[in-house]
Amino acid sequence: MASNNFIDYVKLICRSGKGGAGSRHYFRAKGLPNGGPDGGDGGRGGHILLEGNSQLWTLLHLQYQKHVFAKDGEGGGENLRSGAQGEDIVLQVPLGTVARDAETGEVVLEITEHGQRAILVPGGRGGWGNDHFKNSINQAPEYAQPGEPAVEATIILELKLLADVGLVGFPNAGKSTLLSVVSAAKPKIADYAFTTLVPNLGVVAYRDYKSFVMADIPGIIEGAAEGKGLGTRFLRHIERNSMLLFMISCDSPDIAAEYQVLVNELEQFNPELLDKKRLLAITKSDMIDEELEAEIRQTLPEEVPSIFISSLTNKNIVPLKDMIWKALHE
């Protein structure tokens, strides 16, 4: 996905259709001057719905669609004819889309499955015609219901990528390189910080035709929660991940300290992220020998399983996938 095409946040002003009014018509025919009420019901106003589409990866197609207005329902007619319903509007969205009320921040709905369809803004109900109100006492009601009004709302759509494993690390820690080695993804790779500006997804092939999805999130730095670097804008994409793979380069002066900084930034963004399973990969380990690796191993945090890897030489890439698969299915 090109960086200028990755849109994971849009704001829409939505208005459903109002319901059509019920009819107050009376049947009239030669020889039947008192034919009675025959007013039909008004039609429902159009809904605004979201539908999951597994072929979409971004909200780009909705970026410039600022206003979404559904059609109104038509009024009822004579001879008990109901008014036509307002045409619904169905917005296709990628899986992992969350809809929030812009004013309250409340989650309205979430789309997580292909073909899942849910009402975002309901259309107004059509009013009943006067035929509904006739009875033995009131045989000629002079009234019918108006249709319910349209519903207006400002909705925020946020995309949270659905992945099994989220890669967490400082810029230039080797996250994109690992993703390019274990999957068919082609993220941008270069020898400078903040190479990755948007999340990337890759499907990692495992044994016996099994697979899991890995998400490369743009690097965070100390102070990201206060807006430094790229801030925490993209951390929403790991909120749905089953586990987190922390990646720190072996040439770091203090791996344990860097790991704790990353943990602290995640905690400030969303404390629930710390409830996820974690693994620690020490990257670029082709640059060190076994003796130095043993020394570094003594300094690693004990609360998280760790492994030394090299995406360049494929060192421990298969054992890493084994560790990930085991953690995902424990």
Image: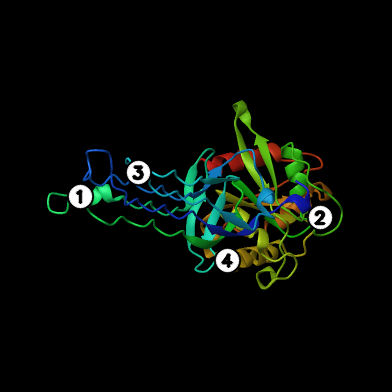
Secondary structure of residue under mark 1: loop
* Relative depth, front residue between 242 and 54: 54
Is 220 displayed left or right of 147 in the figure? right
Camera sees residue 240: no
First reached walking from the N terminus: tag 3 or tag 1: 3
Q: Position of residue 285 (x, y in %)?
A: 78, 49
Secondary structure of residue under mark 2: loop
Identify residue for label 1: 134
Identify residue for label 4: 267
Q: CA distance from mark 3 to mark 2?
A: 67 Å
**Looking at the picture, which amino acid does disc 3 mark?**
Glu
* Relative depth, front residue between 78 and 241: 78
Q: Are marks 3 and 1 in contact (CB under 8 Å)?
A: no
First reached walking from the N terminus: tag 4 or tag 2: 2
Which circle, 4 or 1, is nearer the viewer? 1
Identify residue for label 3: 78
Q: Residue at x 45, y 55 (%)?
A: 18
Q: CA distance from mark 4 to mark 2?
A: 24 Å
Identify residue for label 2: 195
